[in-house]
Structures are given as C-alpha cells and as structure tokens.
Amino acid sequence: MNLREKLCRRVQGKVVVMGIGNPCRGDDAAGSCVAQQICSAPAVHIIDAQDVPENYLGQVADRQPDTIVLIDCVDLQSAPGSVALLEKDETMAYSPSTHRVPMGLIVDYLERTTHAGILLIGIQPQQTDFLQPISADVLSSVEVVARVLNEIFESRRISASVQGANPLTGEVPA
C-alpha cells in the first residue's frame, strides 16, 4: 500500500496538519515546507509550526480534530528523501535534536487532549546543517507529500459537496 492509500484510509473528519521543522537547518525544514504547500480545504486546518510545535498544541486542541497529521524530518535509517507513515508507538523512538520537545511527548499530549487519530509523516533528511538549503532529494519528497495531501483534501472536498456536507466542518447532514 502506498502513502496515498494509507492516508486515504486514515484521514477522517476534521483534520489538523502540522508541519514541523527549522527553516534554517537544511532538510529539517521539510515539514514546514510541506505545510506551506498545502492548499486550504474545508475541515482542514494547516499549521506551520516550524521548530516550536509545542507553541501550537493549544490551537490544535481547540480545533477538536478527528485526525492530526504531523510532518517532520525523521531519521528513518534510509535513503535521503525516503518517506514513511509512522504509527504512534514508532514516534516514541524519534527525538529530533532540532526540537525542544521530543515528538513522543507531543504525540502523547495531543492524544490525551484531543482523542484524535494521530499520524506522523517522516521524511529522511540528508543534512540538517545550519544555514544550508534543503537538499534536492528531500525537496522532491516535500513536493510529493504536499501533492498527495492536496489530492486527498481535494477529493474529500468534492465528495463532501456531492453529499451536501457543511463546507466548514465536512459534516454531512443526517
């Protein structure tokens, strides 16, 4: 099953997408770059948290999402630009050095406060050196992830409009 198929099965209801990453540290900017490339869509709230995701946790909880998609640069022990959809228990193993708060703690907090399904899209960095540009492999993956998310959100928008759903919440009247 590819990334699009996995996300289609898991992304439900109101969605918050949080891109995480330091734009001054090369490939660490991956999550932030994805967030910047996602088009607005009904029932989807996009946050470019950069390297301070902890500053946006209240905003995420206030949205009462059904699904939270976190996107971050993660050492997957694979080729630069590799992309993986990580499960909750896998996020505990990743504690990127460019973030103040480990991803596992962020996921735990969001799970307790929102009861939403939480997904982490990890992108393997090539380098995270200070004041370096994002690498070509990672930039290519950023574009793929953003395109996949935009396609999913667009298909949900079309499906919702056909079903007469509320354009702000995505809820279909009974």
Image (spheres, rainbow, N blue to C red):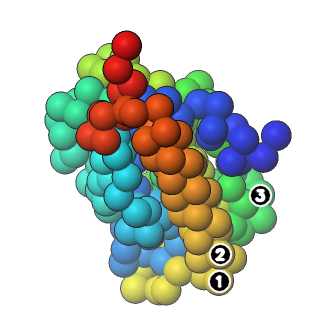
Nearest to N terminus: mark 3 or mark 1? 3
Residue hosting label 2: 140
- Left or right, 28 with reference to 8: left
Rendered location of residue 123, percent (x, y) = 61, 58
Residue at the image position 39 percent from the left and 33 percent from the top: 164
Number of other residues with Cα within 10 Å of mark 2, as a class: few under 14, some 14 to 19, many 20 or more: few
- Which quadrant holds residue 19? bottom left
Disc nearest the viewer among 3 and 1: 1
Q: Secondary structure at mark 3?
A: loop
Residue at the image position 65 percent from the left and 60 percent from the top: 124
- Left or right, 26 with reference to 87: left
Amino acid at circle 3: Ser
The quadrant the C terminus occupies is: top left
Rendered location of residue 11, percent (x, y) = 53, 34
50 lies above or below 106: below
Amino acid at circle 1: Ala
Q: Secondary structure at mark 2?
A: helix
Residue at the image position 44 percent from the left and 69 percent from the top: 37
Number of other residues with Cα within 10 Å of mark 1, as a class: few under 14, some 14 to 19, many 20 or more: few
